[in-house]
Amino acid sequence: MLIRRPDAIKPSEITPDSVYLRRREFVKAGVAMLAGATGLVSAGSVEAQGRGKKLAGARMSNFSTMEKANSYKEITSYNNYYEFGTDKSDPASYAQKLKTRPWTVLVDGEVKRPKRFDIEELLKLPLEERIYRLRCVEAWSMVIPWVGFELKQLIQQVEPTGKAKFVEFVTVLQPESMPGVRAPVLDWPYVEALRMDEAMHPLTLLAVGLYGETLPKQNGAPIRLVVPWKYGFKSAKSIVRIRFVEKQPKTAWVKAASNEYGFYSNVNPDVDHPRWSQATERRIGQDGFFSPRRKTLMFNGYADQVARLYTGMDLRKFY
Ligand SMILES: Nc1nc2c(c(=O)[nH]1)N[C@H]1C(S)=C(S)[C@@H](COP(=O)(O)O)O[C@H]1N2
Ligand SMILES: [Mo]
């Protein structure tokens, strides 16, 4: 599923989706040079649309899918971010009140060099564009051109101790700007976690942008996790703390309904959710109500890269 892509094209040069998608077609045809020189990109239009700040210098990653990306509009108007409400349109409507500056990410726990990172410092790390599928547990999916860096890069800076077996992600809780947290849908703040080897895997991304611009608030500004082989809820938004621990953390969804949501939550077409099948999915914006549903792939299509992490584990038991 993963195809090598040329490194020469900078997503930071991108403005409207149409140009962006057309360029991807050029890349596919192997005329990357031509695409870089089309001159179709105009710097002003991003600001005109009230979008994020451009992220300069992100290089195209080898780990991207060649599937057609969803439009900026689809990616930013159909969201799950329960702190702002449970409807898909709530995050776009209400997340604009989220305060994303000043912002720090505390990295601590079982590490030799705990550190509080300022978001501006993280935005200066070498960034990559990663076009990943995001498969929600609710059986829909999207293809999103993220901009970010490997979580591993941050982990190496703090030097985990031998006791660090899991990594917990704590997300922001701003009750004054989050209408959804008045309801006890989840035990706020939203917490997720990964096993250490999952966190160190090169596919595990800390995203700070999409479509070559800083992250919109509804998508988890200013920094969120993206774990492409797991159901979307593992990809915690608006992270404020990354904590290394010895014991498997209690995550928000496991606390809410452990019979429905497991700690691992690897995309698995063979293990159904108790209330619906996970065998197929609907691609937002591309599959109509009457189109045939797409087959969901094991580990969301990333089996070649991640299946070895689970050798010997019964994935029906560790769902
Ligand atoms: N803090 C927080 N992070 C979250 C969620 C949430 O409700 N709160 N929802 C998760 C779910 S269920 C999904 S499918 C993805 C959706 O990401 P997107 O809206 O950027 O596509 O975010 C995940 N991260
Ligand atoms: Mo989800």
Image (cartoon, rainbow, N blue to C red):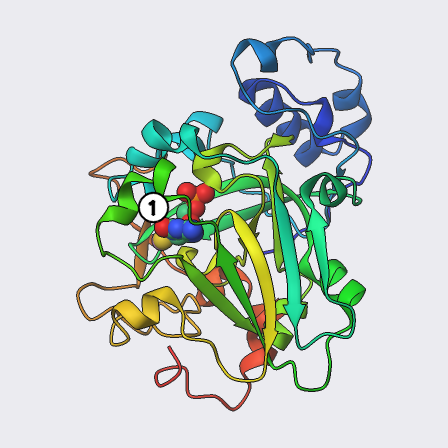
Residue wearing tag 1: 83
Res 283 seen here: no
| Residue at 28%, 75% in the rendered image | 258
Q: Is mark 1 within 8 Å of ligand 1?
A: yes
Q: Quadrant of the C terminus?
A: bottom left
Q: Nearer the viewer, residue 73 or 168?
A: 168
| Residue at 26%, 35% in the rendered image | 288
Counting from the top left corner in percent of width and height, residue 206 is at 62, 52
Asked whether, in this view, residue 295 is left or right of residue 33, the answer is left
Counting from the top left corner in percent of width and height, residue 120 is at 72, 38
Q: Quadrant of the N terminus?
A: bottom right
Relative to 274, is 42 above or below? above
Relative to 132, is 114 above or below? below
Asked whether, in this view, residue 123 is left or right of residue 190, the answer is right
Counting from the top left corner in percent of width and height, residue 40 is at 69, 11
> Is label 1 in a helix, a strand or a loop?
helix
Q: Nearer the viewer, residue 259 or 19?
A: 259
| Residue at 79%, 45% in the rendered image | 125
Q: Residue furthest left?
A: 275
Residue type (three-letter) at the residue carrying disc 1: Glu
Count of picture labels: 1
Asked whether, in this view, residue 93 is left or right of residue 38, the answer is left
Q: Residues within 10 Å of mark 1 (few under 14, many from 20)?
A: many
| Residue at 64%, 24% in the rendered image | 53
Q: Nearer the viewer, residue 52 or 31?
A: 52
Counting from the top left corner in percent of width and height, residue 43 is at 69, 12
Quadrant of res 92: top left
Relative to 174, is 28 above or below? above
Q: Residue furthest bottom?
A: 312
Res 92 seen here: yes
